Image (cartoon, coloured by chain):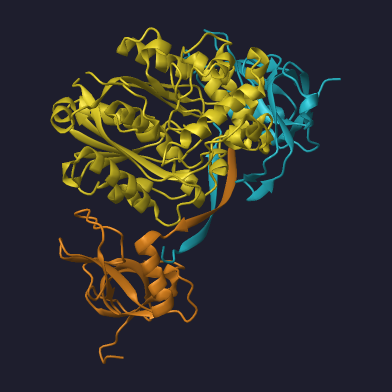
Amino acid sequence: MIREEAIKIPFQYAAGTAGSEFLINLRDHRQLTGSRCSDCERTLAPARAYCPDCGREGLHSVNIGPGAELVSWTIVPDKGVFALVRPDGADTAMLHKLLGPIDDPQPGIRLQVVFREERSGHINDIEGFAIVQENGE
Amino acid sequence: MSERVSVPIEMVQSWRYSSGDSMERFSNGIRHKRIEAVKCGNCQRRYLPPRPVCGNCHLSLTEWVPVSDVGTLEAWTVVYLPFLDGRTGELRDGPYGMGLIRLDGSDTTLNHFLNQNDPAKLAVGMRMRIVWRDELHGAMDDILHFEEVS
Amino acid sequence: MRPVAIIGTGQTNHARCRDDVSQPELVREAASRALDDAGLQPADVDAVILSNMELFEGRALPELWVGEGAFANGKPCMKIATGGTSGTSSCIAGFHQAASGLFDIVLVVGFEKHSEGHTQTGMALTDPFWDRAVASGALGNFALSISQYMAERGVSEEQAARVAVKSRRNAARNPHAHLSDANATIEDVLNSRLLAYPIHLMDMCPQSDGAAAIVVASGDKARKLSAKPAWVKAAATRHEQPYIGDIEQRLLTMRTLRDASRSAYATAGITEPLKQLDLAEIYEPVTYAELAWYEILGFCAEGEAGHLIEAGVTGIDGELPVNPSGGVLSANPVGATGVIRVAEAAAQILGRAGAHQIEGAKTALATGYGVYAWADAVILGSAV
């Protein structure tokens, strides 16, 4: 015998210190924020409260992007193209959408962050990353 | 403290569960208001819900025994606090009575709703009977609730 | 097996809602404080064990997201979940890892952020074929058992209320507690809102946001790093049949807790718990459970628990203080709650329990409780 059951539960997640700063900068300044660990000499994207490698707290917030580099990508049917992108100035990549049109993008190509007009302090305040055409447009 | 951001996300998921053989037989039974337990040949314990193995003796349970729709209230409460039912996403409002009922013929108790939500009218040891829903589909909520045997 | 000890503890400030921090930041707060307490650096930690109930936050792989907050990058890291016992089970796993010789320093961190989800709803996702349609979470489970306990042993609502009063007053000495009231009275408890008969609001544990951590060290390391380690004298855990209706009388008999505590007592050489224990930090999810478990844990004879609380035997100045920290009734971040019990017991032995320190504490019991289906017992002492 098979039984199908649904569950429906609302959750409310706190972004915390660095997460809030990242989301607020998206909302208010159309700006990507990373965190710089001066010990490891690495800039992490997105911003975070402590260095994942050395554990150091009190990292410096730095502006990253708006340009970015494509690291890897995949097509999710009906959902779009998802990509790992490394914002300029950052040493790590973050996951977001790649905006079309897309014609066999190669890792390393140049991208540009695209913000939505309506922003609420949410990761989707970023609409995605668009491919920068070779003529610079 | 500087501004903090908090993000609402609703989880909506669906699951597909297999009952296993013993629960399938039980479920087919209650579709006809027939309740059966499984009995351990070693410790003699009669189990509801039915299951393949006795957890105490680790022996297969293959003997089926009939269970009455009448039993004894072993424990009870009246819940006042509204409860968010994850199956529906809706609040279950209080007060509602709940009980652990040992049906005659079973050695375990089953928890279910009571039609009584006045603490003054509930007591351990009361005799209770199953009230079935009009339409039966082979699930535990075919039992609407338990009522006192008058 | 090598001797092991706890050499440091750390707790967050537990509260109804800690939305000032994310989950990993909350974990970091407790983990950092535990390392500071032990005088260690993150690099000194050999392995990390996490404790959390993921359905309460609805987040897959919490150990992945928060491990970094517990300094786990590049180290062995895993999560243990056994309901309310998750925290004590994680501590016991940490003891085993150090005792076996696998690791010298193990950091155990438990956390929960109940404010982010719906704990009771998550708990009620029980067997879809049997009792999911009627499940009412922890509250319903306890309330059902209490009617039987009251009928059998004649405990009164007032006796149960005394447990809540003790808890709130003790918690007033504990800066980490979520709920405290130095002036709490029996009337306050009896006049608080009825949640499920006979449980009033103040009878029931809260849902807290919080994290707690302990640093477990092998015997050799413990001697080098700590002047006064809290030695693990015994640790036992028991599991039970799955359905609430399988378990005879629940609160009254509590086979898991009886067996786990008897096993731990035997290992630690405890024959008279009331006399030999200097304090106990027990996992009391509801006032009536504390009373029932005084009997299960052998603090008194069957039926004597009401008199024990009335006589003040388990008060902070009594013969056997139970939950000098304020207990689960005063702070309950579930994944952390069991770790808090062990951390509080350890802090007493380490002599760092602050305003709720029991002077000269040498032997302490900590217990864990997980939906009737698990119980843990840990005994710590000032000597190996």
Residue C261: image quadrant is: top left
Q: Is residue C245 above or below residue C189?
A: above
Quadrant that contains the C terminus of chain C: top left
Q: Which chain is orange?
A: A
Identify which residue, C14 or B64, lies in the foreground: C14
Please give the name of the residue rendered at 45% of the width and 23% of the height, measured from the top-left corner: C322
Point out residue A76 in the picture as x, y percentages from the top left corner.
Answer: 40, 65
Horizontal placement of B13 versus C41: left or right? right
Residue C64 in the image: state x and y as whole percent. Answer: 33, 49
Residue at screen point 17% across, 25% down? C219
Examine the image and state in which quarter residue C286 appears. top right
Establish if C53 lies above or below C370. Answer: below
Q: Can residue C40 be seen in this snapshot?
A: yes
Chain B, hue in figure: cyan
Residue A100 visible in image: no
B132 displayed left or right of B46: right
Specify the quadrant of the image occupied by residue A72: bottom left
Tint of chain C:
yellow
Rendered position, C34 above or below A43: above
Is the N terminus of chain C in the top left, top right, bottom left or bottom right quadrant?
A: top left
